[in-house]
C-alpha cells in the first residue's frame, strides 16, 4: 500500500484543545489520553486498529462487519467475485466508526483512515502471509473510506 503520509493536526481536535487551554502549552496528546480515557477503552480500541477477521468461502472479512446473509446478497450481485465482495463488505466509512467526526477536520479523518489502513495491512500480513491484499484509504469531498480485498 503506497499512500501519501499525512500528519495529525491537534489544532483541529476541539476537545483536546480545551484540555490544553486548561492545562498549559506543555499538555500533550498522551496527557489528554491519561485524563480522558481509560484502560478498558484502550483495550477495546485494539479491535479497531488490530481487528479480528473471519474467513468465509475463501474471502477474508472484518469480523465486526461480516454477516453471512449480506455476503450471500453480494455474492449474487457480484457474481461470485470474492475480491469484489471483500472490497464492498470490508468498506468502512471512518466518520461512521465513532461519534464526533464532524469536529475532527477532514485531514484528521484521513490521518485516522491511513493509520487504520496501515495497521489492517500489517495484521492481514501477519495472519495470512501466503495471501496478497490491497488495502485502500480513499477520501472524497464527504468522507474517508478504508477497505481491503485479496489481490489475486
Image (cartoon, rainbow, N blue to C red):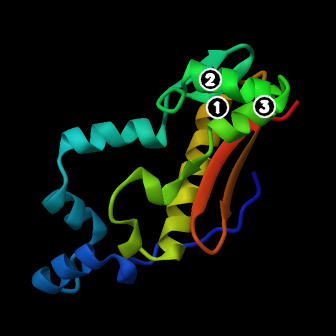
Disc 2 is placed on an element classified as: helix
Q: Position of residue 81 (x, y in %)?
A: 84, 27
Neighbour tally class for label 1: few under 14, some 14-19, many 20 plus, Cα within 10 Å: many
Q: Position of residue 49 (x, y in %)?
A: 47, 43
Disc 1 is placed on an element classified as: helix
Label ID, residue 127: 2
- Which marked residue is nearer to the observer: mark 3 or mark 1? 3
> Which numbered disc flags the more N-terminal residue, 3 or 1?
3
- Per the image, the residue denoted by label 3 is 77
Quadrant of the drawing holding the C terminus: top right
Res. 51 in view: yes
- Contact, mark 3 vs mark 2 (Cβ under 8 Å): no
- Contact, mark 2 vs mark 1 (Cβ under 8 Å): yes
Q: In the figure, is residue 37 to the left or right of 67?
A: left
Nearest the camera: 142 or 145? Answer: 142
Q: Is residue 128 above or below residue 1?
A: above
Neighbour tally class for label 3: few under 14, some 14-19, many 20 plus, Cα within 10 Å: few
Q: Which residue appears at 69% of the width and 40% of the height?
A: 88
Disc 3 is placed on an element classified as: helix
Label ID, residue 124: 1
Residue farthest along the top direction in this orientation = 57
Q: Which residue appears at 24% of the width and 74% of the height?
A: 15
Neighbour tally class for label 2: few under 14, some 14-19, many 20 plus, Cα within 10 Å: few
- Which marked residue is nearer to the observer: mark 3 or mark 2? 3
- Contact, mark 3 vs mark 1 (Cβ under 8 Å): no
> Which numbered disc flags the more N-terminal residue, 3 or 2?
3
Amino acid at each position: 500500500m503506497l499512500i501519501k503520509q499525512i500528519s495529525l493536526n491537534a489544532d483541529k481536535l476541539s476537545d483536546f484543545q480545551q484540555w490544553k487551554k486548561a492545562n498549559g502549552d506543555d499538555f500533550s496528546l498522551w496527557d489528554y489520553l491519561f485524563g480522558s480515557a481509560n484502560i478498558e477503552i484502550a483495550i477495546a480500541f485494539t479491535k479497531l486498529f488490530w481487528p479480528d477477521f473471519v474467513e468465509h468461502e475463501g474471502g477474508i472479512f472484518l469480523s465486526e462487519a461480516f454477516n453471512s446473509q449480506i455476503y450471500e446478497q453480494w455474492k449474487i450481485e457480484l457474481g461470485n467475485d470474492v475480491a469484489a465482495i471483500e472490497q464492498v463488505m470490508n468498506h468502512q466509512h471512518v466518520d461512521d466508526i465513532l461519534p464526533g467526526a464532524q469536529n475532527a477536520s477532514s485531514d484528521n479523518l484521513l490521518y485516522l483512515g491511513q493509520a487504520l489502513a496501515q495497521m489492517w495491512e500489517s495484521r492481514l500480513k501477519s495472519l495470512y502471509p501466503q495471501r496478497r491484499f490491497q488495502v485502500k484509504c480513499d477520501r472524497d469531498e464527504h468522507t474517508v473510506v478504508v477497505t481491503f480485498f485479496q489481490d489475486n
